[in-house]
Image (tube, rainbow, N blue to C red):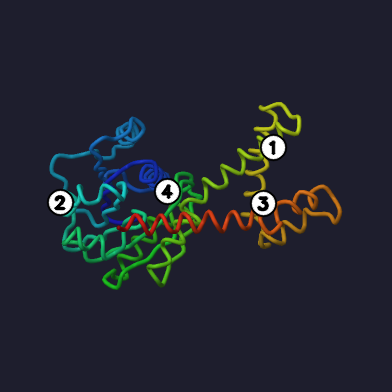
Amino acid sequence: MPASLMLAGAGKMGGAMLAGWLDAGLNPRRATIIDPVPTREIADLCAGRGVALNPPDPEPAAVLVLGIKPQGLDGAAPALDRLIGRDTLLVSILAGKTVADLRGRLPRARAVVRAMPNLPASIGRGATGAYANPEVAPGQRTAAEALLAANGTVAWLADETQIDAVTAVSGSGPAYVFLLAEALAEAGVAAGLAPDVARDLARATVVGAGALLAASPAEAAELRRNVTSPGGTTAAALDVLMRPDGLGALMREAVAAAQRRAGELSG
């Protein structure tokens, strides 16, 4: 963990990462949260764990994590720039905001890591894609790795342009899985199950399949084949889901839409 950490913007994603860092052993006395309108959950977390919240004259930290809304960067930039010291590593989780965007609005920023985490970071099961610009020193990259790995899996990217694809796949991906659980429950009701039974079975199925995928060295496609008997009930369902206009086509369309939106946010 870095010697000192400042989180600017503790919304759902920033708050999830903070909870993960604290659970992973981040010293609360080395953390500062800057958020003009913190949620009750963040205020209670800071009060309960001894994390400084909106101190009057914060000093620049070794690592400044930007967790504000991408659309709020322009308005917040002057105040944020004052929080960057000569040796501060800037870690941004702002979708669509490139290193050039960040350095153009935050003149003091030199070493920048762009990261795209996702919501399961709050329980240490997140997936984060990250890119470091050439000014990031080895020690700073190690500090960033420690922070991001505390929230789950980290994949470093050689090309910054891949961040938008990461945003579309894993950044937004938990919502796709939650929608799958919703849709499966609704289909269960349509098939005759009581709503609470359909909901519980759908939820447990998604959770259990995810746990099996995490525990098994097999690829997802192999696991799918393992539970599909030729001519059986699963095969009948997959014949629908895997048709040319089925789930695969919808997922490609959805990821492409999210990737386009991430690019639009950089404008």
* Amino acid identity at mark 1: Ala
Q: Which residue is mark 2?
A: 78
Residue 210 % position (x, y)? 62, 49
Q: Which mark is residue 212?
A: 3
Residue 21 % position (x, y)? 39, 48
Which quadrant of the structure image shows residue 199? top right
Q: CA distance from mark 4 to mark 2?
A: 32 Å
Q: CA distance from mark 3 to mark 1?
A: 23 Å
**Nearest to N terminus: mark 4 or mark 3:** 4
Residue 221 % position (x, y)? 69, 61
Looking at the rendered structure, the secondary structure element under dot 2 is helix
Q: Nearer the viewer, mark 1 or mark 4?
A: 1
Q: Which residue is mark 4?
A: 24
Looking at the rendered structure, the secondary structure element under dot 3 is helix
Looking at the rendered structure, the secondary structure element under dot 4 is loop
* Amino acid identity at mark 2: Pro
Q: CA distance from mark 4 to mark 3?
A: 24 Å
State the residue at coordinates (68%, 42%): 205
**Nearest to N terminus: mark 1 or mark 4:** 4
Tell me the quarter of the image containing the N terminus: bottom left
